[in-house]
Protein backbone atom coordinates (compact mmCIF):
# COMPACT_ATOMS: atom_id res chain seq x y z
CA UNK A 1 0.00 0.00 0.00
CA UNK A 2 1.30 3.47 -0.90
CA UNK A 3 1.49 5.77 2.09
CA UNK A 4 0.92 9.51 1.69
CA UNK A 5 2.33 12.47 3.56
CA UNK A 6 -0.39 15.15 3.74
CA UNK A 7 0.71 18.64 2.84
CA UNK A 8 -1.87 19.98 5.28
CA UNK A 9 -3.21 18.13 8.30
CA UNK A 10 -6.62 18.49 9.87
CA UNK A 11 -7.46 17.97 13.53
CA UNK A 12 -5.96 14.84 15.12
CA UNK A 13 -8.01 13.02 17.72
CA UNK A 14 -7.44 10.11 20.11
CA UNK A 15 -10.40 7.77 20.56
CA UNK A 16 -10.80 7.15 24.34
CA UNK A 17 -11.56 3.43 24.08
CA UNK A 18 -9.46 2.18 21.19
CA UNK A 19 -6.75 4.84 21.69
CA UNK A 20 -6.36 5.00 17.95
CA UNK A 21 -5.03 8.14 16.32
CA UNK A 22 -7.30 9.42 13.57
CA UNK A 23 -5.95 12.15 11.32
CA UNK A 24 -8.22 13.95 8.87
CA UNK A 25 -6.41 14.71 5.64
CA UNK A 26 -6.96 17.41 3.04
CA UNK A 27 -5.28 19.03 0.06
CA UNK A 28 -2.44 17.49 -1.95
CA UNK A 29 -0.29 14.59 -0.78
CA UNK A 30 3.10 13.12 -1.55
CA UNK A 31 4.51 9.66 -0.72
CA UNK A 32 5.03 8.93 2.99
CA UNK A 33 8.00 6.71 3.71
CA UNK A 34 8.24 4.25 6.59
CA UNK A 35 10.57 6.72 8.34
CA UNK A 36 8.15 9.63 8.06
CA UNK A 37 5.19 7.46 9.06
CA UNK A 38 6.84 6.36 12.30
CA UNK A 39 8.06 9.83 13.17
CA UNK A 40 4.68 11.39 12.47
CA UNK A 41 2.77 8.94 14.65
CA UNK A 42 5.14 9.34 17.58
CA UNK A 43 5.59 13.07 17.64
CA UNK A 44 2.10 14.21 16.66
CA UNK A 45 0.90 12.01 19.51
CA UNK A 46 3.33 13.64 21.90
CA UNK A 47 1.80 17.04 21.27
CA UNK A 48 -1.64 15.62 22.10
CA UNK A 49 -0.80 13.71 25.26
CA UNK A 50 -1.87 15.17 28.58
CA UNK A 51 0.04 14.54 31.82
CA UNK A 52 -1.40 11.96 34.16
CA UNK A 53 -0.51 11.19 37.78
CA UNK A 54 1.54 8.12 38.55
CA UNK A 55 3.29 6.59 41.52
CA UNK A 56 2.82 7.36 45.19
CA UNK A 57 6.35 7.06 46.52
CA UNK A 58 9.61 8.87 45.93
CA UNK A 59 11.76 5.85 45.13
CA UNK A 60 13.36 6.03 41.68
CA UNK A 61 12.64 3.15 39.31
CA UNK A 62 14.77 1.68 36.55
CA UNK A 63 12.57 1.37 33.48
CA UNK A 64 13.86 -1.08 30.87
CA UNK A 65 12.29 -1.06 27.40
CA UNK A 66 13.01 -4.37 25.73
CA UNK A 67 10.97 -3.24 22.71
CA UNK A 68 13.46 -0.44 21.96
CA UNK A 69 16.61 -1.66 23.71
CA UNK A 70 17.01 1.25 26.13
CA UNK A 71 16.66 1.97 29.84
CA UNK A 72 15.92 5.11 31.84
CA UNK A 73 15.63 6.10 35.51
CA UNK A 74 12.15 7.35 36.39
CA UNK A 75 11.96 9.55 39.53
CA UNK A 76 9.04 7.51 40.93
CA UNK A 77 7.31 4.30 39.77
CA UNK A 78 5.56 5.22 36.50
CA UNK A 79 2.21 4.40 34.98
CA UNK A 80 2.48 2.30 31.82
CA UNK A 81 -0.18 2.88 29.21
CA UNK A 82 0.49 1.64 25.67
CA UNK A 83 -1.45 3.11 22.76
CA UNK A 84 -2.15 1.58 19.36
CA UNK A 85 -2.20 3.88 16.34
CA UNK A 86 -3.38 3.19 12.82
CA UNK A 87 -1.83 5.05 9.88
CA UNK A 88 -3.12 4.13 6.42
CA UNK A 89 -4.07 0.67 7.66
CA UNK A 90 -0.77 -0.07 9.39
CA UNK A 91 -0.73 -0.42 13.18
CA UNK A 92 2.10 0.91 15.35
CA UNK A 93 2.34 0.75 19.14
CA UNK A 94 3.60 3.48 21.43
CA UNK A 95 4.93 2.08 24.72
CA UNK A 96 4.27 5.02 27.05
CA UNK A 97 5.28 5.51 30.66
CA UNK A 98 4.64 8.64 32.71
CA UNK A 99 5.41 9.71 36.27
CA UNK A 100 4.28 12.77 38.21
CA UNK A 101 6.37 14.19 41.04
CA UNK A 102 6.13 17.63 42.67
CA UNK A 103 3.99 18.93 39.83
CA UNK A 104 6.46 17.88 37.12
CA UNK A 105 5.54 15.19 34.57
CA UNK A 106 8.27 12.85 33.31
CA UNK A 107 7.52 10.92 30.14
CA UNK A 108 9.03 8.08 28.13
CA UNK A 109 7.72 6.89 24.75
CA UNK A 110 9.16 4.00 22.72
CA UNK A 111 7.76 3.26 19.25
CA UNK A 112 9.09 0.15 17.48
CA UNK A 113 9.04 0.84 13.73
CA UNK A 114 11.06 -1.50 11.49
CA UNK A 115 13.00 0.29 8.77
CA UNK A 116 12.62 3.67 10.43
CA UNK A 117 15.97 4.95 9.14
CA UNK A 118 15.85 3.41 5.67
CA UNK A 119 16.90 5.93 3.04
CA UNK A 120 17.16 8.87 5.43
CA UNK A 121 20.17 10.93 6.46
CA UNK A 122 20.60 11.87 10.13
CA UNK A 123 19.70 15.49 9.38
CA UNK A 124 16.53 14.49 7.55
CA UNK A 125 15.51 12.42 10.57
CA UNK A 126 16.10 15.33 12.95
CA UNK A 127 14.13 17.69 10.71
CA UNK A 128 11.24 15.22 10.59
CA UNK A 129 11.37 14.85 14.36
CA UNK A 130 11.13 18.60 14.85
CA UNK A 131 8.24 18.85 12.41
CA UNK A 132 6.39 16.08 14.20
CA UNK A 133 6.72 17.80 17.58
CA UNK A 134 5.39 21.09 16.25
CA UNK A 135 2.86 19.86 13.69
CA UNK A 136 -0.25 20.16 15.84
CA UNK A 137 0.26 23.92 15.99
CA UNK A 138 -0.21 24.17 19.75
CA UNK A 139 3.50 24.29 20.62
CA UNK A 140 5.74 27.33 20.27
CA UNK A 141 9.45 26.66 19.84
CA UNK A 142 11.70 28.30 22.45
CA UNK A 143 15.10 26.65 21.90
CA UNK A 144 16.60 23.66 20.14
CA UNK A 145 19.98 21.97 20.15
CA UNK A 146 21.64 18.71 19.15
CA UNK A 147 22.27 15.98 21.71
CA UNK A 148 23.91 12.54 21.57
CA UNK A 149 23.39 9.13 23.14
CA UNK A 150 26.37 6.81 22.99
CA UNK A 151 27.24 7.96 19.49
CA UNK A 152 23.67 8.35 18.22
CA UNK A 153 22.57 11.84 17.21
CA UNK A 154 19.43 13.29 18.73
CA UNK A 155 17.49 16.52 19.14
CA UNK A 156 16.24 18.46 22.14
CA UNK A 157 13.52 21.11 21.89
CA UNK A 158 12.10 23.35 24.56
CA UNK A 159 8.56 24.44 23.70
CA UNK A 160 5.64 26.17 25.37
CA UNK A 161 2.05 25.09 24.94
CA UNK A 162 0.06 28.06 23.69
CA UNK A 163 -3.14 27.07 25.48
CA UNK A 164 -1.83 26.17 28.94
CA UNK A 165 1.49 28.01 29.08
CA UNK A 166 3.26 24.82 30.22
CA UNK A 167 6.83 24.27 29.11
CA UNK A 168 7.83 20.99 27.46
CA UNK A 169 11.42 19.83 27.22
CA UNK A 170 11.61 17.01 24.66
CA UNK A 171 14.58 14.87 23.73
CA UNK A 172 14.37 12.33 20.93
CA UNK A 173 16.49 9.74 19.15
CA UNK A 174 16.03 7.60 16.04
CA UNK A 175 17.40 4.08 15.79
CA UNK A 176 17.24 1.55 12.98
CA UNK A 177 14.01 0.00 14.22
CA UNK A 178 12.59 2.37 16.83
CA UNK A 179 12.00 5.97 17.84
CA UNK A 180 12.54 7.16 21.43
CA UNK A 181 11.14 10.29 23.03
CA UNK A 182 11.61 11.46 26.60
CA UNK A 183 10.09 14.61 28.04
CA UNK A 184 9.76 16.81 31.10
CA UNK A 185 6.63 18.98 31.42
CA UNK A 186 6.12 21.79 33.94
CA UNK A 187 6.98 25.44 34.33
CA UNK A 188 9.97 27.01 32.58
CA UNK A 189 11.86 26.81 35.88
CA UNK A 190 10.85 23.17 36.42
CA UNK A 191 12.25 21.89 33.11
CA UNK A 192 15.56 23.66 33.77
CA UNK A 193 16.08 22.11 37.22
CA UNK A 194 18.90 19.59 37.84
CA UNK A 195 16.29 16.88 38.45
CA UNK A 196 15.13 17.33 34.85
CA UNK A 197 18.71 17.09 33.59
CA UNK A 198 19.24 13.93 35.63
CA UNK A 199 16.14 12.28 34.15
CA UNK A 200 16.97 13.14 30.55
CA UNK A 201 20.63 12.16 30.94
CA UNK A 202 19.71 8.80 32.49
CA UNK A 203 18.58 7.36 29.13
CA UNK A 204 21.02 4.67 27.99
CA UNK A 205 21.29 1.82 25.54
CA UNK A 206 20.96 -1.76 26.73
CA UNK A 207 23.62 -4.23 25.59
Image: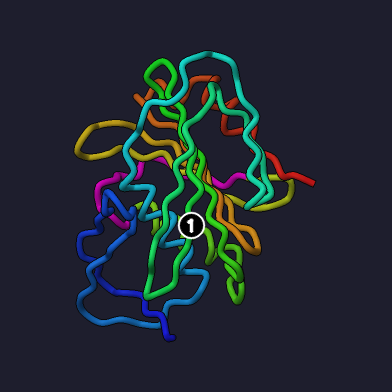
Residue 163: name its quadrant: top left
* Residue 111 spot, x, y in % from top left: 53, 55
The extreme right residue here reads 207
Q: Can you give x and y, in whole percent of width and height, for residue 53 in the image?
A: 38, 26
Residue that appears at 48% across and 52% down = 94
**What kind of element bears circle 1?**
strand
Is disc 1 surrounded by few (<14), some (14 to 19) or many (20+) residues within 10 Å? some
Give the residues in magenta: 135-147
**Residue extending farthest bottom:** 1
Q: Name the residue under label 1.
A: 93
Q: Is residue 100 left or right of residue 200?
A: left
Residue 67 percent across, percent down from the top left: 63, 52
How far across and how far down the image is residue 100, in percent? 42, 24
Residue that appears at 46% across and 34% down: 98
Which of these two is toward me, 137 or 111? 111
Q: Nearer the viewer, residue 47 or 127?
A: 47
Q: Is residue 146 magenta?
A: yes
Residue 116 or residue 18, whichever sits in front: 18
What residue is shown at x 48% (from left), y 64% (from top)?
A: 38
Figure quadrant of residue 61? top right
Say if 13 sits above or below 87 in the image.
above
In the rendered image, residue 158 lying in the magenta stretch gets the answer: no
Q: Give the residue at x 56% y 50%.
A: 180
Amino acid sequence: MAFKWPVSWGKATMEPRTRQLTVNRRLRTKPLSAVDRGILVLFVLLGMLLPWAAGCGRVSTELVSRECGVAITMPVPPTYEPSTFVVEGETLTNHQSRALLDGITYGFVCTPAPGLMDGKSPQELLDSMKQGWLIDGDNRLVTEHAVALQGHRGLELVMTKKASGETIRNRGFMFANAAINISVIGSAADVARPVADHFLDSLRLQN
